[in-house]
Amino acid sequence: MGSRVSREDFEWVYTEEPHAQRRREILAKYPEIKSLMKPDPNLIWIITMMFLVQLASFYLVKDLQWKWVIFWAFVFGSSINHSVTLAIHEISHNFPFGHHRAQWNRWFGIFANLPFGIPYSISYKMYHIDHHRYLGAAGIDVDAPSDFEAWFFCTTFRKLIWVVFQPLFLFLRPYFINPKPITYLETINIVSQVTFNIIVYYVFGIKSLIYMLAASLLGLGLNPISGHLIADHYMFFKGQDTNSYYGPFNFFMFNGGYHNEHHDFPNIPGSRLPQVRKIAAEYYDELPHHNSWVKALYDFVMDDTMSPYLRIKRPQKGNEILNK
């Protein structure tokens, strides 16, 4: 159903990812940027408040009719839970407590994960390191879609289905493309999450549990802010691995839209990425960027030239295989 996309393969390149070189150039010219590379303790209170807000919402929806449970899951809970994923992203970079307290960040990530309903904080940390280090590397960077996804979701209707169920692909893809041994922290993450879900069920009831899980599914699917999952790295601009967005949704997303800046400086918290852009304006102002995540989502589904194939990929190299 719907017209078939025109692409039949990924955009294969044999160059290094662009962020390391740009980082070296910017630091040579603006060494003061190093002063931004420090923890952001405000994240501790912001993320804790998000947890409490969702806890309150579990109470408020527990006696509603089912149609209103799903309505509020989409209108309110989905945005909160999508923001939770960006909070977990910030935690994966050790921003709340700093690199010298890395373990504290892992425990805090497990805590932040709780209102999301699906345990993934610890696993995300491991795979996200690969995403930064080996951007687009086939079989390593699991942020990029699999060959099957790109081949199968090749019509307008199928792309829409892919977008709706994108959270399932995001969570399951790593275990098919680049499986890693289960760690004890992942086990704790899973046990903690299952225990929390059971508590939600017994304290608030089945409607609150469904609200939480539906909010996560909807938040990473058709919620307008989920457009960043497409906008960040799909090749909307020819030859460009990473795309930024500077609009108002950044307020709810820990400045996740400053994505070129983030990949250039993954040791700088999202709250300070606008300062990076301001200091090194000549490096970022000329780069094409998105003005709307909603438009990026719409264009991806409706444009026949766009599909999951629209990603830059790089063949593995020997040192990447050894470091997996």
Image (cartoon, rainbow, N blue to C red):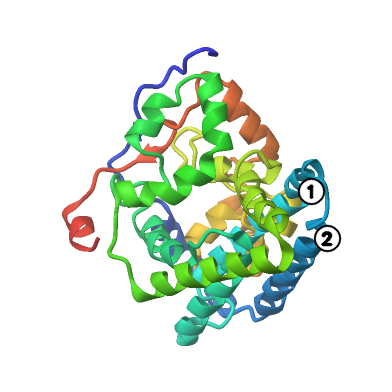
Q: Nearer the viewer, residue 219 or 280?
A: 219
Q: Is residue 200 above or below residue 161?
A: below
Image point 49% across, 65% down: which residue? 121
Say whether disc 2 or disc 1 marks the residue closer to the N-terminus.
2
Name the residue beneath numbered marker 2: 60
Image point 55% across, 20% down: which residue? 156
Q: Secondary structure at mark 2?
A: helix
Name the residue beneath numbered marker 1: 72
Circle 1: residue type: Trp
Q: Nearer the viewer, residue 130 or 206?
A: 206
Quick one: quadrant of the C terminus? bottom left
Circle 2: residue type: Leu
Q: Is residue 190 left or right of residue 274?
A: left
User: Looking at the picture, how far across and down is residue 110, in whole percent?
Assistant: 53, 72
Image point 40% across, 71% down: which residue? 187
Would residue 279 be visible to someone looking at this image?
no
Label 2–label 1 contact, CB within 8 A: yes
Task: Mark 2: give few (<14), some (14-19) or many (20+) Cα within 10 Å.
Answer: few
Task: Mark 1: give few (<14), some (14-19) or many (20+) Cα within 10 Å.
Answer: some
Q: CA distance from mark 2 to mark 1?
A: 10 Å
User: Looking at the picture, how far across and down is residue 296, in whole percent?
Assistant: 63, 35
Q: Secondary structure at mark 1?
A: helix
Would residue 221 be visible to someone looking at this image?
yes
Image point 45% across, 57% down: which residue? 22
Q: Nearer the viewer, residue 143 or 256?
A: 143
User: Looking at the picture, how far across and down is residue 97, in whole percent?
Assistant: 56, 83
Please identify, in this view, whether the residue under mark 2 or under mark 1 is nearer the observer.
2
